[in-house]
Amino acid sequence: MDSTTPRQPRQPGKPAAGAPEGGSGYRIACVALLGAAALVGLYAALTLAGVLENRCWLEATTGRPCIACGCTRDFALLLSGRAPRWNPESGLFFALACAEILWRVAGTAVRRMPRAAIAADVAVHVVLIGWLLSKSLARIVGA
Ligand SMILES: [Zn+2]
């Protein structure tokens, strides 16, 4: 571009071309995931209060507990400062859930998340989802 070429005005809300940050789409995803976490928390509270029945579809279908069976009760124990006792991996899942919530809060608070952080976020979740799926499959086949 030479000095006689008019500059294109930047559209409001859009980063400049080549900007190394994620835009509002990432923030919207973080808000949506926080909303989903709030709904899961509400569901857990209602099942713990006996208002809703807490049924595991995998256990009902296969007779085998899923990798998250017992986590609702264990998370309630952990939140009250007691040790989990229903699922041996509840402590790990609780730590991951806390990290997830903190990251999503940060994702909504930061105006533009660096692209490297978003890429790391996606990579971590691909690994975690693969790990959870492999553990779930192992439970189903009884490995
Ligand atoms: Zn289950």
Image (spheres, rainbow, N blue to C red):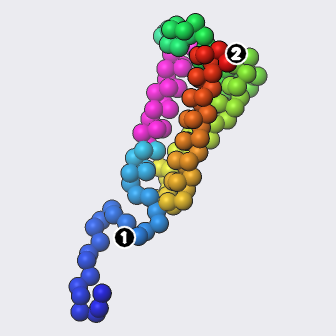
Given the image, on which type of amino acid does mark 2 rest? Trp
Nearer to us in this view, 69 or 94:
69
> In the structure shown, which secondary structural element does the residue marked by tag 1 occupy?
loop
The structure residue drawn at horizontal position 42% and vertical position 44%, both measured from the top left corner, is: 29
**Quarter of the image that includes the N terminus:** bottom left
Q: State which tag comes first along the sequence, 1 or 2.
A: 1
For residue 9, what is the image quadrant? Answer: bottom left
Given the image, on which type of amino acid does mark 1 rest? Ala
Q: Horizontal placement of 60 versus 5: left or right?
A: right
Q: Position of residue 8 (x, y in %)?
A: 25, 77
Cβ atoms at labels 1 and 2 below 8 Å apart = no
Nearer to us in this view, 111 or 3:
3
Q: Is residue 11 above or below residue 78?
A: below
Q: Which residues are magenta?
A: 31-50
Count every numbered label the image shows and give the total.
Answer: 2
Q: Bin the neighbour count of mark 2 within 10 Å (Cα to Cα): few under 14, some 14-19, many 20 and up.
A: some
Residue 36: within the magenta? yes
Instruction: Decide if ligand 1 comes within 8 Å of the CB at mark 2.
Output: no
Name the residue that disc number 2 marks: 86
* Residue 17: mark: 1
* Residue 28: mark: none
The structure residue drawn at horizontal position 33% and vertical position 63%, both measured from the top left corner, is: 14
- Mark 1 or 2: in front is 1
> In the structure shown, which secondary structural element does the residue marked by tag 2 occupy?
loop
Q: Horizontal placement of 56 versus 73: left or right?
A: left
Q: Bin the neighbour count of mark 1 within 10 Å (Cα to Cα): few under 14, some 14-19, many 20 and up.
A: few
Q: Main secondary structure of the magenta part?
A: helix
Q: Position of residue 120 (x, y in %)?
A: 57, 52
Q: Horizontal placement of 81 versus 64: left or right?
A: right
Q: Is residue 99 visible?
A: yes
Q: CA distance from mark 1 to mark 2?
A: 51 Å
Q: Is residue 23 above or below residue 101?
A: below
